[in-house]
Amino acid sequence: MSPAQLPPPGWKVVIGLETHCQLATSTKLFCGCANQFGAPPNTQVCAVCSGQPGALPQFNGEALELGLRAALALDARVPARTKFDRKHYFYCDLPKGYQISQYDEPLCTGGGIALAGGKFVRLARIHLEEDAGKAIHDRGASSLVDLNRAGVPLIEAVTEPDLSSPQEAHEYLVALKEILQFAGVSECDMEKGSLRCDVNVSVQREGGPRGVKVEIKNLNSFANVVAALEHEIARQVQLVEAGGAVQQETRLFDADARVTRTMRTKEDAHDYRYFPDPDLPPITLAREHVERVRSRIPELPAARRQRYMAALGLSEYDARLVTQSRASSDWFEAALRHSDAPKELANWLNNEVAALFSEPASGVRTLDELPFKPFDLAELVELARAGRVTRAGARTILRAMLARPLAPRELMRELGLEASNDAAQLERWCREALVGRDRIAADVRAGQDKALGALIGPVLKLAGGKADPVAVRETLLRLIRTP
């Protein structure tokens, strides 16, 4: 069954998502250990996060601030009171034997995200909790546990079962990641494990009863969410059509084989023996505090896209690319303060600057690694707009900016790339390019203007990046068509 056939005719798919997002705090949720990715194993651990007897948790107020930001950015309802509970289960990466989470009085309820097609994906709740450690199993031979991640603050955003396809799940996750990044809640870097997703999926015949829900745990990329759902939907449909029954269970996704596999029988809430944590008093959420947090939330991605389109004249495509991350949008805003050419800036940022990240020779992978600043790009764009440098010359300058701490104007002069306005010199370059290309010239005279492409390149090469392609084209046409 191909992904294009999902769900197949006569079937309905029901999907809910549980997204875990590590909060961008400086320390862990209940102790002073650093919340920092990449440290040597078990070096950011203390008596509290390693579960030593008698160690008492102390709540990190910064996590509450970021959790509230997430809630308000997603238009959720924040209650007057919230509390922590103990969620009991046994695993090697959970040294206390329970996880401090929230059960019946979560941080917030409601809210959600609107998809492009008009569907509104409702949130059931967002709650705060601590992360577990990281366990690495060597095919049953041995297991290694790193507790650096134990106690790192998380929010878990749980949707209602409103999604009906893998594609909708992907769209929701992209939008959620954008909102949390822009609100300053988290880096949402899936490679670092700061954003992880569990999916719940069931299938049912049209008009029939709700199917049995299966959970797929710890999906670490949006592509894997889509692939896991595609496989699991097809598996469940084929199982039921063959006369079998779907079992309620938790499964894992094998990204290499692109299949889901049984992990364990699914637990219910009572299996975790939730009860209020006796070491952590309930938290009162004063309206004044909540409104102060709301006032500190920056403009969110959907609002920025609308502003860029309405006030700056960007296309929807360019506005979406510019706002694909908080970093790119902030970089664009900073460059815009030095330029009155938003469309050209967006074009350069989305194309020429973005191209640097895929070039191994550039040595940069993100905007933060660029050695030049937004105002340097604004100056380069202005040089190109004013005709001081050609597009090709500007690209050369952009790459030179990676290695030389000089302004674009200085690099233009140093590299000899200032555009030539000498019509006589341009004509000499064009005449030189025409030598020995009589057949191409004849094709142009016969009305085949596309043949000019074979002449423009040689002229630009002779000009060494100093000639404007439009002027080259006009000069070639005049020379070819003039008797």
Image (spheres, rainbow, N blue to C red):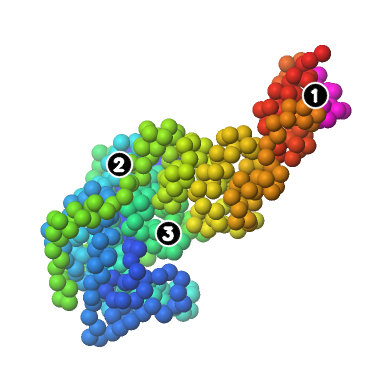
Q: Could you tell me residue 43's position as x and y percent?
A: 41, 80
Residue of label 1: 440
Residue occupying the far right of the picture:
436
Q: Quadrant of the C terminus?
A: top right
* Image point (34%, 50%), residue name: 179
Q: Residues within 10 Å of mark 3 (few under 14, many from 20)?
A: some
Residue of label 2: 114
Q: Could you tell me residue 80's position as x and y percent?
A: 12, 58
Q: CA distance from mark 3 to mark 2?
A: 23 Å
Disc nearer the start of the sequence (3/1): 3
**On the picture, is 480 further left or further right than 255?**
right
Q: Could you tell me residue 44's position as x and y percent?
A: 38, 78
Q: Nearer the viewer, residue 483 or 96?
A: 483
Residue of label 3: 189
Q: CA distance from mark 3 to mark 1?
A: 53 Å
* Dominant SS in magenta: helix
